[in-house]
Image: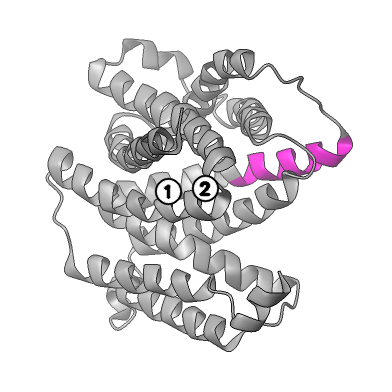
Amino acid sequence: MNHRHFTYLLILSMFLWGGGWTALKILTVEVSVDVMVFWRFFIVSLSFLPILYLLKKPLKINLANLKYVAGSSILNIAFMVSAFYGIKYGFAGSGSVIITTLSPVMTFLLVALIFKKRLQNIQYFGLILGIIGGIVMLQLNDFSLFFNSANLFFLLSATIWAGITMLSQHSQVHIHPIHYSFLISIIASIVSFFYAYNSDLLAVLEMGSKFWISLLYLAVLGQSVATTIFYMASGKLGSEKTSSFMFLVPVFALFIAWLVLDEPIELHIVVGGFISVLALFFINKKSPTQTKKV
C-alpha cells in the first residue's frame, strides 16, 4: 500500500475511534460499569489474537516491559470507569472533545512538572491557551456547571489518559505497541473480572442486538482495528504526521453523537475544543534554534 492508502485508513481509524464514544453512551444505559469494563477488555483480548498471528512477531515478556503493562492496565481500567460515568451523566460528543483535546495538554503539563522540563516561550503560550480551552469547555466561569458529575469525570479521564500516554511512550523502547496493547487488555480482563466477580457477568448473553453491536463496535472496531491501523500508519507515515490525524476524532465523535443519539452540538464545546487544538499546535512547535540542533 502507498501513502495515500494509509491516509485513507487513518481517516477510517479516527472515525472508528470517534464512534466509540456513542457506543459507550449506549452501553451506559444497558449495563453496569463493572460488567461493561470486563467484557470490553475480554473481547479486545480475543480480537487481538488474529492480529498477533498476522503480525508474526514473537511476544516477549520481561520485567522491563511488565511494569509498564501492569501500570497501564490499572490506569486503563480507571479511565474506562471514569469515562463510563462521565458519558452516563453527560453527552458523548462533549465528553469526547473534552477528553481528546485536554489529554495532550495534561500530558505535556505532567511531563513538565514531573521531569522539570524547561519550556520554550511558545510552549508556555500553548499551555496557557490549553488551560483557557479547558476553562471554556468545562464552563469554569460558572462553578455550579463545573461541579456537575459529568465535567468532573471528563477532567479525571483526561488526567488519567495523560498518565497512560506517558507510560506508553516509555514502553515503546521495551515492547512492540501491538504486544503492549494486547497484554494490557489481558491483564485488565483478569483484574476487572475480580472487580466484577459479584455481578452477573453472564447476564449479557440475554442482552439484545443493540447492546452487542455497541459492545463489539467499542471493543473490536473502536479499539483493536483502529489501534492496529494507527500503529501501522505510524510506521509508514511517521508519528508526527500520524498524530495530527487525532484532531479528527472529536469532530467525528460530535457528528456521530449528533447523528445517532440526537445530541446537541454545544457552542462552548466547539469553541473550547478549537482553542485546545490550537494550543497543541504551539505546544508541539519547535523553536528555530531547537530545529537546527535536531
Residue labelled with disc 2:
79
| Residue 83 marker | 1
Question: Is residue 285 visible to us here?
Answer: yes
Q: Nearer the viewer, residue 259 or 151?
A: 259
Specify whether 169 is left or right of 238. Answer: right
Within the image, what quadrant is residue 154 found in?
A: bottom left
Instruction: Give the main secondary structure, helix, strand or loop, of the magenta stretch.
Output: helix
| Circle 2: residue type | Phe
Point out residue 63 in the picture as x, y percentages from the top left corner.
Answer: 88, 37
For label 2, the crowd category at 10 Å Cα-Cα, with few meaning under 14, some 14 to 19 and many 20 or more, is many
Q: Name the residue rendered at 37%, 11% in the picture.
A: 205
Tell me which segment is drawn in magenta. Answer: 63-75
- Mark 2 vs 1: CB contact within 8 A: yes
Q: Name the residue rendered at 32%, 65% in the picture.
A: 148
Give above or below for 218 relative to 264. above
Question: Is residue 91 visible to us here?
Answer: no
Label 1: element kind: helix
For label 1, the crowd category at 10 Å Cα-Cα, with few meaning under 14, some 14 to 19 and many 20 or more, is many
Specify whether 170 is left or right of 1. Answer: right
Point out residue 262 in the picture as x, y percentages from the top left corner.
Answer: 11, 45
Point out residue 90 in the picture as x, y percentages from the top left corner.
Answer: 28, 54
Give above or below for 44 relative to 256. above
Q: Name the residue rendered at 55%, 39% in the picture.
A: 236
Q: Name the residue rendered at 60%, 81% in the picture.
A: 288
Cα gap from disc 2 to disc 1, whole angstroms: 6 Å
